[in-house]
Each structure stands twice: as structure tokens, then as C-alpha cells.
Amino acid sequence: MKRIVKYQETQVNLSDISPNPWNPHDSTPDELTSLIGSIKERGIIHPIVLVEVDRPVVWSEKTYSIQKPYMVIDGEQRLKAASIAYTDGDDTFSAVPCRVIGKLSEWEEWELSEIGQMANHQGGS
């Protein structure tokens, strides 16, 4: 039986978001530069998908203690681009649009990985 993903859309401060320890995607410097330009011009169109951190993350037999309230499930490159834009002086990126899909304790890490992959392959990133 499939679970319906319920979420809350909100703005979250960059300082409250932790990267994902199992993120399989990366950008080339040129791709990241292009993404930074795009979000500066148009904003973040697809919200970053987050989960509230209320327990350690276990992935590939390693345990990660996340020290921030939220962790990225989908949108790692958008988060990186927004962080660079903010560091470069664009205060409009001090907080970013996000979808919070609940608490980490409500999910298994493999489920979160699947959600991130589905979002990536269906135009979410």
C-alpha cells in the first residue's frame, strides 16, 4: 500500500537546512554557475523538499548526527546555489521555499531516497 505524502509549504532559513549525507547528485562548476544565475533571475521555482530531523540518520551502515532542524530530501543543488547567492550578498535567499514532508522518525531512509529520486526524474529538480 502506498503512503500519501502530506507536506507543508513554507520558507525555511538557509541556516536551518542540512545537506543530505547520501545525495548522489552533483553539479559541475558551470552547471552551478548557471543555476545561480537562474535562481537570481527567476527565484526558486521548485521548492526544496525537506524532512524535520528528530533522530540520527542511518545510511550505508553509517550513522549521521544532523545538527540542524531540517535535512534536504530533494533540491541539494538549489540549496547550494541559494547559499552561494546569499553569501555573495543577495539577501533574498536568506530563506528559501520548501516542502516539509514531516519528521525523519516517520520515514525510513530508503523511502526518502526514493522520494528524492522520483522528484529528480519527474522534473522536481
Image (cartoon, rainbow, N blue to C red):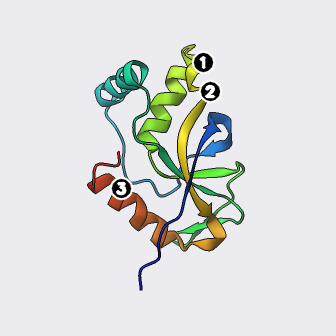
Residue closest to the eye, 58 or 48? 48
Task: Mark 1: give few (<14), some (14-19) or many (20+) Cα within 10 Å.
Answer: few
Q: Residue at x 41, y 58 (%)?
A: 116
State whether residue 47 is above or below residue 36.
below
Residue type at mark 1?
A: Asp
The quadrant in which the C terminus is found is top left
Q: Residues within 10 Å of mark 3 (few under 14, many from 20)?
A: some
Q: Which residue is mark 2?
A: 94
Q: Are marks 1 and 2 in contact (CB under 8 Å)?
A: yes
In this view, 116 is above or below 36: below
Residue 91 — which label?
Answer: 1
Count residues near mark 2 (Cα–Cα under 10 Å), then give few for <14, some for 14-19, many for 20+.
some
Disc 3 marks a residue whose amino acid type is: Ala
Q: Is residue 107 left or right of residue 53?
A: left
Callout 2: helix, strand or loop?
Answer: loop
Tag 1 secondary structure: helix
Q: Residue at x 69, y 59 (%)?
A: 65
The answer to which image quadrant residue 7 occupies is: bottom right
Tell me, for residue 119, which label it has, or none. Answer: 3
Tell me where residue 42 appears, x and y as whole percent: 38, 23
Farthest bottom residue? 1
Q: Kindly identify the amino acid type of the residue bearing the numbered disc 2.
A: Ser
Quarter that holds the N terminus: bottom left
Answer with mark 3 or mark 1, whichever residue precedes in sequence.
1
Instruction: From this view, report whether residue 7 is shown above or below residue 62.
Output: above
Task: Measure the C-alpha gap from mark 3 to mark 1.
Answer: 27 Å
